[in-house]
Image (tube, grey):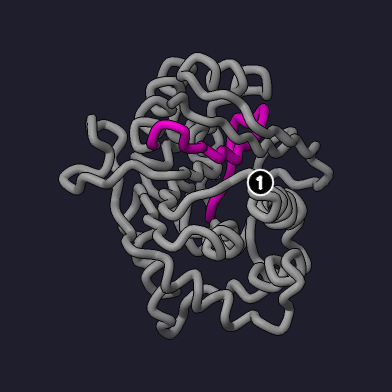
Amino acid sequence: MDCTIPKLYHQHGMDSRSHLDLYFSKTEDMVFAEDTITFPMACLHYLLSTGRIKGTFLIDISLGSFIHHLFSASNFFKKIVLLKFQERCIMELNRWLHDRTGAYDWSHTSSVAAELEGTRDQLQEKEMRLRSSIMQILKCDFEQENITSPVLLPLADCIMSVWILEVISKNEDEYMKNLEKIIKLLKPGGQLLLIGALDTTYWTAGTEQFHCFKCNEEFVKNAFGKVGLVIDYCAVQRRSNVSDLTDYKAALFIVGRKGE
């Protein structure tokens, strides 16, 4: 593996199935489950169940083709649109959405959502509910003023951005520019739920290493303030696993509300 020049996810693409296997699978040697599955799902369940996150229309802008963070969200948001950078990820998601042969098995994560909600006898219903909530899967391009061009989406009640801003941003200026493009899709009073990896410089998928903009909790909080987001909630979980697939130090879950 050539580790000297990390690739850019949104420009070079990646092996989406390898990414799922390495960071989100149910295999015993998958060491990231606490940070990539349990932590974000628990935070989201708490916010939704206590009424701190509300609405009917959700836009999700996330890395790769994972959907586990949306199981609890689909209990509340009846319309969900997914934005993806790669056709390969859209194909992977469509395979699951239409329950086709070879679709990725997310039952281990729907079980986590059911356990959090106390509905362990409704696993099949959870997947059906999420499938029925997903209205569109669109390709996005942050080089465009309207990142979903030519489609013009209505403003969202809530946007989820998961492990993507630090991956598509080369530096601080690009991070701010990309954050501003995301919140343009958010209605006044709406909330941005951002899940990120702190102090990361690289991550791996397949045999390839990818760039990540290194930022800390203070930087993200300041970025929210600069674009007019008032922080409603913030949780940080320090990394406990050992792996050279990525060098993040902690997982971040932060919520900001757009001004009226």
Q: Is residue 103 above or below residue 176?
A: below
Asked whether residue 134 is in view, the answer is yes
Residue 86 image offset from top left, x and y in percent? 34, 52
Asked whether residue 170 is in view, the answer is no
The amino acid at mark 1 is Leu
Q: Residue drawn 46% across and 80% down?
A: 102
Q: Residue drawn 57% across and 81% down?
A: 125
- Neighbourhood count class around disc 1 (C-alpha, 10 Å): few under 14, some 14–19, many 20 upward: some
Residue 56 image offset from top left, x and y in percent? 44, 55
Residue 205 image offset from top left, x and y in percent? 54, 51
Q: Residue drawn 62% across and 21% down?
A: 221
Give the magenta range. Answer: 187-206
Extreme right residue here? 240
Q: According to the image, label 1 marks what residue?
A: 245
Q: Is residue 199 magenta?
A: yes
Q: Is residue 252 magenta?
A: no
